[in-house]
Image (cartoon, rainbow, N blue to C red):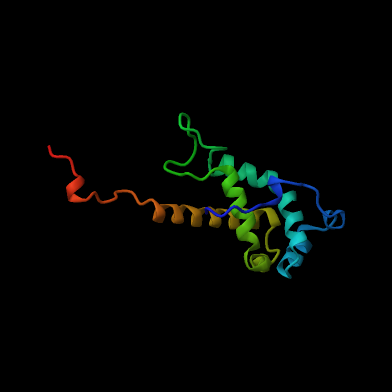
Amino acid sequence: MSTKRSSPHSGDTSSDTRLEDYRDPDLARLACQGTKEAWDALYLRHKDFLQWFARERLKLPQELTTTNRRGVEGSAITVEQFMNEVYIRMWDRNGRRFCSYKERASFPWWYEAVAANIYSDLCRQERRANPSGKRIPFEDEDDE
């Protein structure tokens, strides 16, 4: 995750006025067809919900500090990082993830489930990168 990527919540928040009037299912359908502006409009529409989900449901810290660290034990994922990853991963492969939205539930419920899966993926990646119980070479062990 060292690559610098941008998302609409980190910069200009204006969106195409035509798309603002579309319903969520219509925007999801357009995003499935590869219309990035539709995903941008959906993201901005549900940005506050995603931020609430990250802070209140996942208990992610707003930002990390060395003295007071809230959130998931052992996690280095912040609200901002999570929101960036959701934006990017939802759009990966030109919006193909939106093709799984079938309107069986309202868009926010589906979006929450997808965001939760993305969070699980992030946690798995972090655990692989920083496994607990790393072995200490015999030469580096303290003599007791």
Looking at the image, which is closer to me, 74 or 113? 74
**Residue 137 percent coordinates (x, y):** 21, 51
Q: Is residue 30 above or below residue 132?
A: below
**Residue 21 percent coordinates (x, y):** 85, 55
Q: Is residue 23 above or below residue 10?
A: below
Position of 126 with respect to 113 (left or right) is left
**Residue 86 percent coordinates (x, y):** 61, 54
Q: Is residue 133 above or below residue 101?
A: above
**Residue 98 percent coordinates (x, y):** 67, 65
- Residue found farthest to the right: 18
The total number of labels drawn is 0
Position of 85 with respect to 122 (left or right) is right
Residue at the location (78% across, 63% down)? 26
Quadrant of the image containing the C terminus: top left
Looking at the image, which is closer to me, 9 or 33? 9
- Residue found farthest to the top: 67
Residue at the location (71% across, 53% down)? 43
- Residue found farthest to the left: 144
Looking at the image, which is closer to me, 6 or 80? 6
Name which quarter of the figure residue 35 lies in: bottom right
